[in-house]
Amino acid sequence: MSNSLFINKSLLTKKTLWIKNPLSVFTANQQDASNGIVIRDGIIIELVAKDAKPKNDINQVFDASRHVLLPGLVNTHHHLYQTLTRAFPPALNKRLFPWLQTLYPVWAKLQPDMLHAATELGLAELMLSGCTTVADHHYLFPQALTEAIDIQVSAARKIGNRVMLTRGSMSLGQDDGGLPPQSTVQTDAAILDDCQRVISQFHQAGPGAMVQLALAPCSPFSVTTDLMRETATLARANNVRLHTHLAETEDENDFCLQSFGLRPLDYLESVNWLAGDVWLAHGIHFNDDEIKRLGKAKVGIAHCPSSNMILASGICRTKELQAAGVHVGLGVDGSASNDGSNMIQEVRQALLINRLRYQADEVTHQDVLYWATKGSAKVLGRNDIGELAVGKQADIALFNLDEPRFSGSHDPLAALILCGAHSADYVMVGGKWKVEQGRLLTGDIDEIQVRHKASALSLVN
């Protein structure tokens, strides 16, 4: 077999897998793994340098000579429910606020089975693109969907990605000067009670966690000031992270000035959110002083290239943020503003959009791969994933270059990004294969699509 898993049955020791002789490898840490990695019990136990052999006894070998080997990609910002409203005609060609005002009434009709279908489809799509860890920002809790996080945990356990599920919130509806319909908002007390419930029920701490929770008001102007402060207090009491949208558009900055008399970052600081346990989606429209303050606080930024292009929001100042000490990662963002859930394509988009702001030699394919792996892991506060190194989780993605788009390419790693890879051949999470030969092992993708399409039609009709 051309890409086989060869097993030496004469060895009865604990299963130790050598992913051998990759075509190219990106470790995200400049260590030498030219001849692959060794995995045992879901952990990387050895990097094998060029022309070297493993020091550990091996009883399984995966021949990766036709594959580019990467750490599993890490998506720092998404809205999985939005896979149900991709390319939705009434919302096309609109700026952020009108786009939201068009879609909020549709999203208000979400039902539990719809959210499960959307989460399952989005996670499967991401897994097939080489994405092993997904942060999802769910902030819609209409009466029919008060247990949304429970539904997402169920879907995530089926597909097998690691997830950082952020219990979002909106408490200011249209009657209070906000954007969403009243049917989608909750009281501060109901929100905080459910935040504590889902943390207690689902959050896993420590290395190897498959499900983690964070708290995430949709935006500073979609919840009360008291809720922003109390959410921060609750998150820190439970040692979980904080997330929200910030500085996505100039309209948002103006709205914040009108509402609070403060720019968004000043408001964030006033409610105790300017800290290293916080990561922000987009972070486009910060001035020089604000970037310095973000760096000093070690805040993370989820850079969302495709969404920023589709909504014409602007280009994140990634290099200035990184130079100031900000952790920069990549996010796919909602599939109603992307309109896909493909992490390896997002890496290419990150390279292209940054080349519009910076010179060609200032942002490289290695830079954007770093953002999608170790950079994203730092944004989510995880040091057990995002790189190929001894002691890290065995989360990996293997891509082959056996498609016409790669024909004639000479640098396999660069070709992965420049020529536009769109799907992984093999994906592993915690030492367990989730994708083999481009096929999802944890679900029937055709059946998942059938249920998802039915849910999408039901939602908009």
Image (cartoon, rainbow, N blue to C red):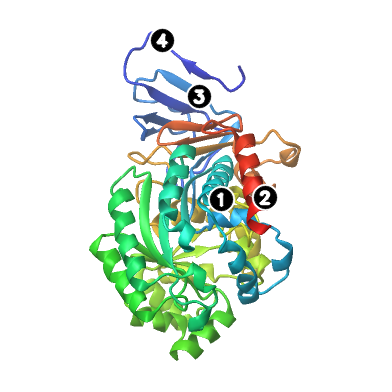
Label 3: state its secondary structure: strand
The CA span between labels 2 and 3 is 26 Å
- Which residue is depicted at the point 44% across and 52% down? 374
Name which residue type carries label 1: Met
Which residue is the site of mark 1?
Answer: 114
What amino acid does circle 2 point to? Leu
Q: Nearer the viewer, residue 379 or 255?
A: 255
Please report whichever mark, 2 or 3, sits nearer to the chain's N-terminal start: 3
Taking the spot 44% from the left edge, 31% from the top edge, the residue there is 432
Q: Which residue is mark 4?
A: 9
Pick whichever of labels 1 and 4 is earlier in the sequence. Answer: 4
Upstream in the sequence, badge 4 or badge 3?
4
In the rendering, at what x and y percent does residue 113 appear?
53, 48
**Dot 4 surroundings within 10 Å: few (below 14), some, or many (20 or more)?**
few
Q: Which mark is residue 177?
A: none
Query: Mark 1 or mark 3, which is nearer to you?
Result: 1
Residue 418 is tagged as 2
Circles 1, 3 touching at the beta carbon (< 8 Å): no
| Mark 1, secondary structure of its residue | helix
Q: Is residue 131 visible?
A: yes
